[in-house]
Image: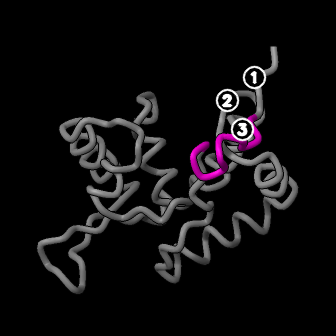
Amino acid sequence: MFGDRWSLLIIRDLMVRGFRTFKEFHDSGEGIATNILAERLQKLQTAGIITAECDDGDARRINYRLTEKGIDLAPVLLELLVWGARHEHTAAPCALIDNMAENRGRVLAEVRRRWRERDSTPLLPKFSDAEFGGKSEKRRRKG
């Protein structure tokens, strides 16, 4: 289930970027094809990691949400985020990742609180080179 690139990115986006809809996942900039996205969402639902719910305001719109089984992946995902930012190229500001690493317990408590309260406010701010004028701090791969 987690052997493909997209499943973990979908879980990450649900957990820390506040994404909920097919369109948000597709427009995230990762470049996932619509057929692959639909397949991965279905696979994650079948595995009990996410659930699909009709939007309260528009029954045609589907919102995806982590299940309890899915939110239990938060500690693993946090470690992957920290590891990735330390060892691979990323647009994530160094101070943000350092703060997450130093405050793992609080970060995980906040992720769980947002999940429990259905708060889709992103845990991580949107960041890219363009937003930082091309001068965002980038961690370089060690090696």
**Measuring 74% from the left and 48% from the top, which residue is drawn there?**
93
Q: What label sits on residue 89 in the rendered view? A: 2
Q: Which residue is mark 3?
A: 85
Nearer-the-camera pick, 99 or 40: 99
Q: Quadrant of the C terminus?
A: top right
User: What's the CA distance linking mark 3 and mark 2?
Assistant: 7 Å
Q: Is residue 133 magenta?
A: yes
The residue positioned farthest toward the right in the image shown: 102
* 31 over 63 or under it: above or below: above
Task: Answer whether labels 2 and 1 touch (C-beta < 8 Å).
Answer: yes
* 60 over 11 or under it: above or below: below
Task: Answer whether labels 3 and 2 touch (C-beta < 8 Å).
Answer: no
Question: Secondary structure beneath disc 2?
Answer: loop
Which amino acid, by three-letter code, is at mark 2? His
Residue 135 lies in quadrant: top right
Q: Position of residue 97 (x, y in %)?
A: 77, 49
Q: Which residue is mark 1?
A: 141
**Measuring 61% from the left and 61% from the top, which residue is drawn there?**
125
Q: Position of residue 59 (x, y in %)?
A: 14, 78
Q: Position of residue 66 (x, y in %)?
A: 43, 62
Q: Position of residue 107 (x, y in %)?
A: 73, 65
Question: What are the residue bounds of the magenta stretch?
Answer: 129-138
Left or right: where 72 falls relative to 61:
right
